[in-house]
Amino acid sequence: MLRSLFAALTALLLLAPAPAFAWWEYGHQTVAAIAYRNVAPETRAAIDRLLARQALLETPSCPAGTIEEASVWADCIKPLGARFSYAYSWHYQNVNVCQPFDLESACKDGNCVSAQVTRNAALLKDRSVPLRERVMALAFLVHFVGDLHMPLHAGDKGDLGGNRLKTNYGIYSTDRLNLHSVWDGLLAERAISTPPSLVHAYPADERARIAAGSVEDWSRESWEVSRQHAYAAALDGKPCSTDQERGHLSNETIETMVEPAREQIKRAGLRLARLLDEALG
């Protein structure tokens, strides 16, 4: 039974189209759903009004009519080629987890995820910006806040955010499985599916506590999770080890990763809610 489940999940991982490879749809849509449940009513109405104009994006193969659809729009448009190729590097920032935190050098000319969170929040808030650009800014913002909180989009060790670090996942092992895809897919699916549901209205004091801080603060936090819970877990507690060519994730180790993954998704949702309230409330 367990082997069949892993085989099915891995088949999805390997066969799904490339645009889904960023917390899969499930991760991004969950972040969006948390945010939508926790924004003010007037913000929710403003989101709906903007997304009702999705046709302005002229991407019929990539709908953005709901906040859940908008959350994966930035990945969906990748195959559209030159039209959106400028945004490729906006999904991540490779801040070295084996060096002191240095966001500036990892974000030259604003071509990184944290800078684009700030940029798109500002565009969304500015009512003088053309409507099409505000609809696009909303879709980008919803997606990029999710990306910022996926640890391996926020920190790496010269291995493309764990894409070059092969690893198993419990009993399952294949050469096409790596640390990035584990956090993007298999672990995210498990974390979100673990009860209780992450999608609900949170108490005001919890929302305020989690949503506090700056985008740089959130970047540093995600970078720390990348070091402490992603690389350290896969490399026997030594995140900067150069002796281990492959990672190893036992079932026991995976158990310890579930809660950090859930926390990142909750943080993303509540912080996105704050940014949306500030821009649209």
Image (spheres, helix red, strand yellow):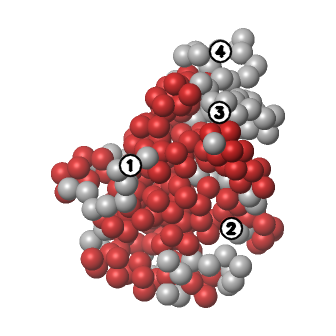
Where residue 241 appears, x then y in whole percent? 65, 15
Q: Quadrant of the C terminus?
A: bottom left
Q: CA distance from mark 1 to mark 4?
A: 34 Å
Q: Position of residue 172 (x, y in %)?
A: 70, 34
Q: Which mark is residue 76?
A: 2
**Label 3 or label 2, whichever comes before in sequence order:** 2
Q: Is residue 166 visible?
A: yes
In this orientation, which residue lies closer to the viewer: 46 or 200?
A: 200
Q: Is residue 61 above or below residue 160?
A: below
Q: Quadrant of residue 277?
A: bottom left
Instruction: Give residue 64's quadrant in the image.
Output: bottom right
How far is the residue under mark 3 from the one under mark 1?
Answer: 21 Å
Residue farthest to the front, as pictured: 1
Mark 1 — residue? 195
Disc 1 marks a residue whose amino acid type is Pro
Q: Where does label 4 land, which residue?
A: 241
Helix, strand or loop at label 4? It is: loop
Q: CA distance from mark 2 to mark 4?
A: 35 Å
Camera-nearest residue between 166 and 213: 166
Write the residue at 42% across / 82% down. Answer: 48
From mark 3 to mark 2, how far is it between C-alphas? 27 Å
- Residue at image mark 3: 169
Of mark 3 and mark 4, the one earlier in the sequence is 3
Are circles 1 and 4 on residues that touch, CB within 8 Å? Answer: no
The residue type indicated by label 2 comes to Cys
| Label 1 Cα crowd, 10 Å radius (few <14 / some 14-19 / many 20+) | few
Q: Is residue 263 above or below residue 157?
A: below
Displayed quadrant of residue 20: bottom right
Above or below residue 43? Residue 160 is above
Crowd band around label 4 with a 10 angstrom C-alpha radius: few (<14), some (14–19), many (20+): few
Measure the C-alpha gap from mark 3 to mark 4.
19 Å
Give whichever of discs 3 and 1 has the lower sequence position: 3
